[in-house]
Amino acid sequence: MDISSLIGVFGAIGMVVMSIYSSGGSIGTVVDLPSFLMVVIGSYFALMLATSLSEALGIWSLLGRTFRIPVFNEKGIIQKMVAFSEKARREGLLALEDELEDLDDEYMKKGLRLVVDGTDQEVIRNLLELELSQMQGRHADKIGTVNMWATLGPGLGMLGTVVGLIAMLKNLEDKASIGPNMALALVTTFYGSVLANLFMTPFASKLRAQDAKESMVKEMIIEGVLSIQAGDNTRILVMKLLAYLNPSDRRTLEQELLKDN
């Protein structure tokens, strides 16, 4: 569970509620079913218009991913790469074949399978980078769906405000109702802003960060696979792969992997 997502959501909602009460208002002043239907439900249906049905329905599981910490096991991948490198240097690249079936990472398995098959280095790089770019494209489409909802929300909010103002202007003779009607008209703008800035834009940013992390891990695998194929010294391989880790993880793993090399 990604605690920062939980803290962010509940903290942001809490601050909005606190600001409403501290300014003399109440939750009841911003709770309005027609505004909710127009902004949240209306923008969701508009999202279906902008995307496919499967993408619109799949956005819920996508948003759920922002509350989970993806595990890419960078340290385990580096350790496995080092073990493969040492084995390949001792026994040859073909000796890796028996080890491949136990690999959990399909991306690494594909790369090393190409190495064992004697595929040209440039071909391996192109194939792995092609798969990486396709993954990034799929992720970008999904993140774009979330950003689309963030864009549609405020737009529907303004539309609701315009509808409310039209109704208010038609009843200007009733001066006592102008204030309440104006407040109600602005509630839709509030809903649109909350939907975009409190939820969808941060969710998209979190998904973008997860995509960047996964892309980095796959780039590290490409570097490791090609280094093993080239027969690089294990110390060189370790230094290449450690460059992808943050400094604290790098120091810990460096002491473990380089002490005997």
Image (spheres, grey):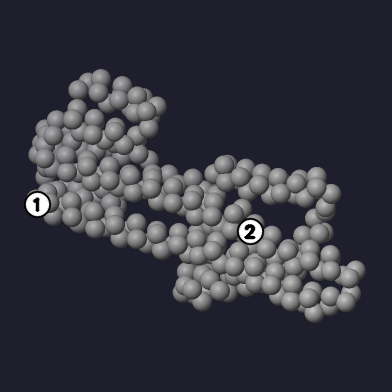
Vertical relation: 202 (above or below) 181: above
Q: Amino acid at mark 1?
A: Asp
Image quadrant in which the N terminus is located: top right
Please name which of the two marks, 1 or 2, marks the residue nearer to the observer: 2
Q: Which residue is mark 2?
A: 193
Q: Amino acid at mark 2?
A: Ser
Left or right: residue 71 versus residue 59 is left
Image quadrant in which the C terminus is located: top left
- Give the x, y percent position of residue 249: 38, 29
Whether tag 1 and tag 2 are in contact, CB under 8 A, the answer is no
The kind of secondary structure element at disc 2 is: helix
Which residue is found at the position 83% from the left and 52% from the top? 25
Vertical relation: 234 (above or below) 28: above
- Give the x, y percent position of residue 237: 20, 33
Which residue is found at the position 56% from the left and 67% from the top? 152
Q: Which residue is mark 1?
A: 120
- Give the x, y percent position of residue 172: 84, 75
Residue 60 figure quarter = bottom right
How far is the residue under mark 1 from the one under mark 2?
53 Å
